[in-house]
Amino acid sequence: MAAQEADRVVDTIRDREVAVEQDHLDQVYRRLEEKIHEAEFLMRDAARRGQVGTPGALAERDAQVFRAGVHLNRLNSEFEDFLFGRIDLLYGKDGKKGPDGAYTSVEPADDAVRPDNTAEIGETLHIGRIGVLDADYSPLVIDWRAPAAAPFYRATPVDPGRVVRRRVIRSKGRRVLGVEDDLMRPELTATLDGAELPVIGDGALMAALGRARGHTMRDIVSSIQAEQDLVIRAPAASVTYVEGGPGTGKTAVALHRAAYLLYQDRRRYAGGILIVSPTPLLVAYTEGVLPSLGEEGQVAIRAVGSLVDGVEATAYDDPAVARVKGSSRMLKVLRKAARGALERGDAPDRLRVVAFGRRVELEAEELRSIRHAALGGTAPVNLLRPRARRLILDALYAKTGAAARQSDPELAAELRSSFDEDVTSEDSFTEFLDAWWPELTPRGVLAAMADERRLGRWARRVLNQGEVRRLARSLRRDAYSVHDVALLDELQTLLGAPARPRRKRELDPLDQLTGLEELMPVREESQRERAERLERERVEYAHVIVDEAQDLTPMQWRMVGRRGRHATWTVVGDPAQSSWSVPDEAAEARDEALGTRPRRRFTLTVNYRNPAEIAELAAKVLALAMPGAESPRAVRSTGVEPRFTAVGDGDLAEVVRDEARRLLDRVDGTVGVVVAMNRREQAARWLADLGDRVVALGSLEAKGLEYDATVVVSPAEIADESPAGLRVLYVALTRATQQLTVIAGRRDEPDEAGVPDLLRD
Ligand SMILES: Nc1ncnc2c1ncn2[C@@H]1O[C@H](COP(=O)(O)OP(=O)(O)OP(=O)(O)O)[C@@H](O)[C@H]1O
């Protein structure tokens, strides 16, 4: 009876507190409506001013319409939980207000807490997705990224600053659904407006973590933890480097950091923020988070296989081929191929022209040495065609012997110029040049590398015979693999954009005035400038965020590095989850991409995804994959131990299907079935009719994703797939938020309880 009474009291307090927040939210919406009216008025007014018609008025109108439009857009967006937080603070050390209208001090005033441990709340702040000021400029809602909102995320009972109570408000549209409080100074008896501060619930974080997962990631704006907040708000100078085990929120933090940087310095990041993600699946999973934080447009989330425009690679190479394609040894091979691809079997091996009424010829050997001379240095091949053309004309002219016969330099120059015109106006000369020095494309060169004999020449002393054979074979495939994309990008740099055909008339008057020799330096100069301009016009970003950075191969680091040469960086990853087999080589390429910029390092230590029961099992594989590495600390426990099933002589498909069905009944959200890469199509067929809550994944595709429940099929098959197999298995075992089943095949050598050899103590 007494217990029921107590429950009722709590309910009444809860209802009252919900009503308090509802009042506040109503006030916020009233203010938003006023602002919408103001914005609409501004638009109408701006249109009216436009009718005045002076250039000044028009510019002003454009600016006003733009501002009002942006304003309206933001206000009209229907945010789920638009208002999500509140902090009740002690009086602060100084009374200065920041630009958002909130007091800036984070330290309590000396007399904020009385000797008997009572205190009064000096300031209450509400935190939301955007800031809203009341008509008198007092803050109704503070933008979560504003400095005054930081204590909402940073305060802990160990280091509470001014925060006494931290409240997460759950709301939907205009309705407050509930509140959850954390008390940062439990030793205090604090009062607000004369009444004691009530505390509701036992923490918002646990409520958020226990929720069922869907096919898209949710933002964590209402429950960012202190160690995560330090990363999100780290100053953007140089490189922010974040390591942390599975589930520590690296991806979530990276996304919130992008939103924070835009808020901090929108002008600086107008150059765009690029987020590089390992797979299209992870892109799809995460791409809703930024819009939910009110940010769109300036952030590009791209899978590493989609960084080159026009290519969307999803195919995976087998590990031996991937290892070659990703290695920085490929750079040497590509450099040779980019130049060697000019030599095609069908290229002409002699040039005949008629000039000054006689026939002049260049033989195969002469053409070869001209090509060799033209290719000297490291300039992009496509930009060297004009040089080759000039050398050919030089060689042809030398054969006429005309230079020796003319001693007057002016006349000599004139003679030469008319010779060049004679030769180059012949169609056959242009046709020869097109065939002998064709414009090369990255795709064309990669296709040329599929010829094992040619590839063997270009890869001499770099790749062994077996590697050449496997590489050539993989390039004969129709679709590009994820690793091919970095090769295409490298080739783009090695080849350069082709020189645009020069319009003849443009040069003629000058030709006649000064002679060709004098024109040469001018032409060379403009070519260089063009090369530089084209380089600049490549897509570059103001900030680059690399998610799952441990997986980037050396060649991929080069590709990503080119997109952030002048950028600041945020790099998040976990070496223990790396699927790249030669981590030292990748680290070298990463350091080259990041240059000498100073790095600020952060480590995330708490696993918010896996219950302790699953984290404990995964730790066994971590100990094998990376002896000595520390597992992140799991924050919750479900009491449900991982389940083991051995297939024995049974049908694997049936066992997997049964298990997926069983888990579908036990969780509300998604079930992920992770298999070795070579089983992924097969597994998709097994699960095809179980509905869209179940997903079949190859082990490399599971990167970064999470499911309510996961089935890991044959750990041994996953671990044996590549030299990095144990780390890939560690990834597979850390995807579940609630339940995990491991299915053992014969290769797993399960014990009588079905536990695979790899997962036993
Ligand atoms: N502060 C938080 N509040 C609520 N949920 C959180 C918080 N931090 C992380 N999470 C949740 O924990 C899960 C794991 O986060 P995330 O995917 O960002 O981790 P990760 O470090 O990138 O993991 P992995 O290395 O395995 O890819 C997500 O569901 C995320 O929403």
Image (cartoon, rainbow, N blue to C red):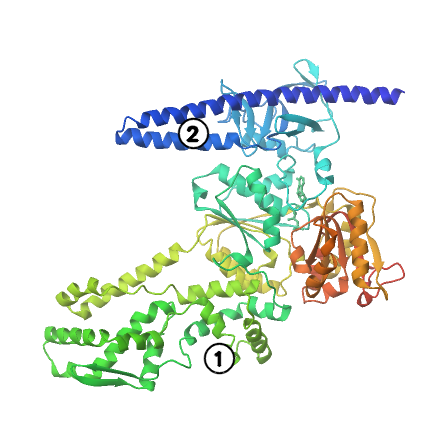
Q: Which of marks 1 and 2 is nearer the N terminus?
A: 2
Label 2 sits on what residue type? Ala
Callout 2: SS:
helix
Alpha-carbon distance for marks 1 and 2? Answer: 62 Å
Name the residue furthest top: 194
Tell me how many marks there are.
2
Give the left or right position of residue 647, taking residue 174 as reference: right
Please report the residue visible at 52 percent of the width from the left and 24 percent of the height from the top.
32
Label 1 CB-ligand 1 distance < 8 A: no
Query: For residue 646, what is the image quadrant?
Result: bottom right
Label 1 sits on what residue type? Arg
Q: Residue 454 carries which label?
A: 1
Tell me whether circle 1 and circle 2 mark residues in contact (CB < 8 Å). no
Q: In which quarter of the image is the N terminus?
A: top right
**Along the viewing direction, whichever of 545 and 174 lies nearer the viewer:** 174
**Along the viewing direction, whichever of 213 and 196 lies nearer the viewer:** 213
Give the left or right position of residue 734, taking residue 397 as reference: right
Q: In which quarter of the image is the C terminus?
A: bottom right
